[in-house]
Amino acid sequence: MKYLDEYRDGKLAQKVVNEIRKVQTRPWVIMEVCGGQTHSIVKHGIDFLLPEGIELVHGPGCPVCVTPLEMIDKAHAIARQQEVIFCSFGDMLRVPGSEGDLFSIKSQGGDVRIVYSPLDCIKIARANPDKMVVFFAIGFETTAPANAMLVWRAHQEGIKNVSVLVSHVLVPPAISFILDSSQNRVQGFLGPGHVCTIVGYSDYEPIAERYHVPIVITGFEPLDLLQGTLMTVRLLEAGRNVVENQYARVLGREGNRAAQKLVEDVFEVSDRKWRGVGNIPASGLQLRSQFREHDAERLFDVGEIDTKEPEICISGQILRGIKKPHDCTAFGTLCTPQNPLGATMVSAEGSCAAYYTYGRHLKKEPELVSIAAPSPGGAA
Amino acid sequence: MCLAIPGRVIEQFERQGMRMARVQFGGIVREACLEYVPDAQIGQYVLVHVGFAISVVDEEEARRTYELLEQMDQLSELDAPEVDEARAGGKPQ
């Protein structure tokens, strides 16, 4: 497929790896922020290709992972109600709450539906005027415009039986939170390409300056990730704490103004709790008060929800790049994608789930493949 | 979750006041909302996330990035020893 296949070229990947090897003079720890990037890195073995001393650690950018357990329990309590059609993106359906998941609620007679787009909820609401259609509006800045459009259209068209359960989070406060920690190891970032497609990257410039870290906004294909890593290593070696854009074919510094405008009209910034991490001030979005008639949290009183996370889980440290999946004694034994104990295992984009999916629970130390080393006969 | 896929706009239409398109991804065609990319034209590639086009792919930038990658390491290739065809024998690769 155009704009995908050409960024998966193995020979070019080797060239970029060789270039990183030439540029690098010392070890560096780089975090990719987005869960989609984590998944791509583990799937394609990018971290194994990199020269020794370039370590990729995996950030908190999987929205399914960081949705708090009590929010999932709240969603389930709403989905169990007779008058509700509960709609969600597919990756939320297998996430276990304190009692079962959305699939088990569906199997017990609940009307739970997977939607391709939030706008599908409008069609479902029109076809079912006697039901309340509740959409689980989760995601980062990338997804906020789509969810905002659902609320805006429902409001404009007077469709009263559409509501949203909002659990939206924002990337820059999470990056600051990681860098504020005394345990922080991260020295540079591969910034989230699709988040910045919406918001641009001017908000990342003060972070780079304040915390003295380079940030390279990066795409999702193997060559994007390798080139983003090369650009980050160059900036680290030169001591330049600036923001650069590897993903210029998709985004510019200002982002998508039309999308930003609607998000600002519908949502306002709020404090949010991140699963495994805790409360981060001004790190999320909530509905503005004029849209409260579409706010599922207000419409459904599901009572007090008390949750308890397993103590053995270290996902909070993994999400901040302090530890990796193999540092956890439960990884691949007590904790698997079928029986996840915490944030980083509940979604395919969580780093523990990605490590497990691609067989990294089977062997602690991967065998390094010689593809990354320049051959005696010269470069390929 | 933040997955977004490039596809080609093959048809534009309006539905209930919203700009929509049919977008081709390899062999699959799906609908996408164009409200956030008002300048998107038929034939252009857009990046689609949960049914919304969020960006028009800049073909010139895509080509430039790719060329930059292709040119990388060229100097070190010049360092590689020359292969003597007569002595190497066999068919040229």
Image (cartoon, coloured by chain):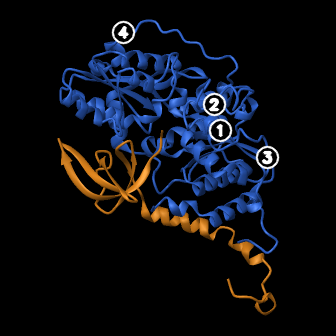
Chain colours: A blue, B orange
Identify the residue under disc 1: A356
The quadrant the N terminus of chain A occupies is bottom left
Identify the secondary structure beneath mark 3. Answer: loop
Kind of residue at badge 2: Thr
Gap in angstroms between the C-alphas marked 1 and 4: 38 Å
Q: Which of marks 2 and 3 is nearer the N terminus?
A: 3
For mark 3, name the chain: A
Confirm whether circles 3 and 1 share one chain.
yes
How packed mark 2 is, by other alpha carbons closer than 10 Å (few <14, some 14-19, many 20 or more), is: some
Please name the residue shown 54% across and 27% down the image. Answer: A66
- Residue at left 39%, top 25%? A106
Q: How far apart are marks 4 and 2 (CA)?
A: 33 Å
- Foreground mark, 3 or 4, reads 4
Q: Distance between the residues labelled 3 and 4?
A: 52 Å
Q: What residue type is labelled 4?
A: Asp
> What kind of residue is marked 3?
Pro
Q: Can residue A140 be seen in this view?
A: no
Q: What residue type is labelled 1?
A: Tyr
The residue labelled by disc 2 is A336
Q: Is A318 left, or right, of A60 in this rendering?
A: right
